Image (cartoon, rainbow, N blue to C red):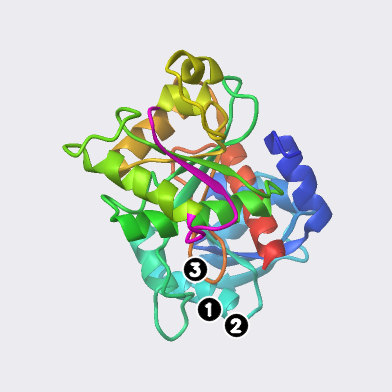
Amino acid sequence: MIKTFNDVLNLAKERGPKTISVAVAQDKEVLLAVKNAVDKEIVKAILVGDSEKIREISEEINLDINGIDIVDEKDVTEASRKAVELVSSGKAHIVMKGLVDTSIILKAVLDKEIGLRTGKVLSHVAIFDTECYDKLLFVTDAAMNIAPTLEQKKEIIENAVYVAQSADINEPKVAAVCAKEKVNPKMPATVDAKELEEMNKKGEIEGCIVGGPFALDNAVSKEAAKHKGIDHPVAGDADIILVPTIETGNVLYKALNFLANSKSAGIIVGAKAPIVLTSRADSDEAKLNSIALGVLMASKK
């Protein structure tokens, strides 16, 4: 059973190495993560960007670039396109954001000619390894979809389930979290949550158990669920937290990182390949965890 990021890293080593293409790779924290991933033999790397700066940083952090392909491209837009094209052409399995704005790399990902479009919703899945919980906790969507519709929430769940299953969580429990655990017509998120549960029961959302609406406490605490008389397989035992809006997800993401001192990872799902897209504020450890998750997803395809 995968319960920690150490488990994720071990599984990634077993299933790797996969090739990662890094867009605008001249970033110290990104290259540290790549170095750690290469050292752990979970990836091989192709670094796209300013080759002179990449080599300078590599020397500074003792990254052995022998055996690592470096594609010299100083223009960040073109570097992003080349990094994505390496994946779409099959020369790499994972694309990673380096020192470039998210909008630029996502534009390359969505390019009709060289991109990784599937027609599905792109969504962000964050994963947390925290002392506050007895297993990995997946949170979606904290970074991409602002106020998803019911159909978008369905696809966001499907994306998150795919990530969880890549980590050998075969039937993840999904909690559609709202401000309260009862349906209230004045609170549309609670109505959507109940509808998503019904869709799951009808087989319209597969590979998981969906419950909702839940408040956060009774989604992750069996004691809180029991206290409120909630009897549901997901109650107090959620693997995946589906948030109603990006604000909710963003606050939960940062609370777990900065107040609960959690280890974390983040990945974009819904494209033809995993997209490692982390924040500048994320540690190189979080970036390494994200790369490992990308390896597991690439192995599942």
- The circle on residue 160 is none
- The percent coordinates of residue 141 (x first, y second) are 40, 47
Does the magenta portion include 218?
A: no
- The percent coordinates of residue 67 (x first, y second) are 77, 66
The answer to whether any part of residue 23 appears in the image is yes
**Alpha-carbon distance for marks 1 and 3?**
13 Å
Dot placed on the residue nearer the N-terminal end, 3 or 2: 2
Q: Amino acid at mark 3?
A: Ala
160 above or below 240? Answer: below
Residue marked by disc 3: 271
Q: Is residue 120 left or right of residue 234?
A: left
- The circle on residue 89 is 2
106 above or below 176? Answer: below
> Magenta residues, as a range?
202-215
Q: Amino acid at mark 1?
A: Glu
Q: Amino acid at mark 2?
A: Ser
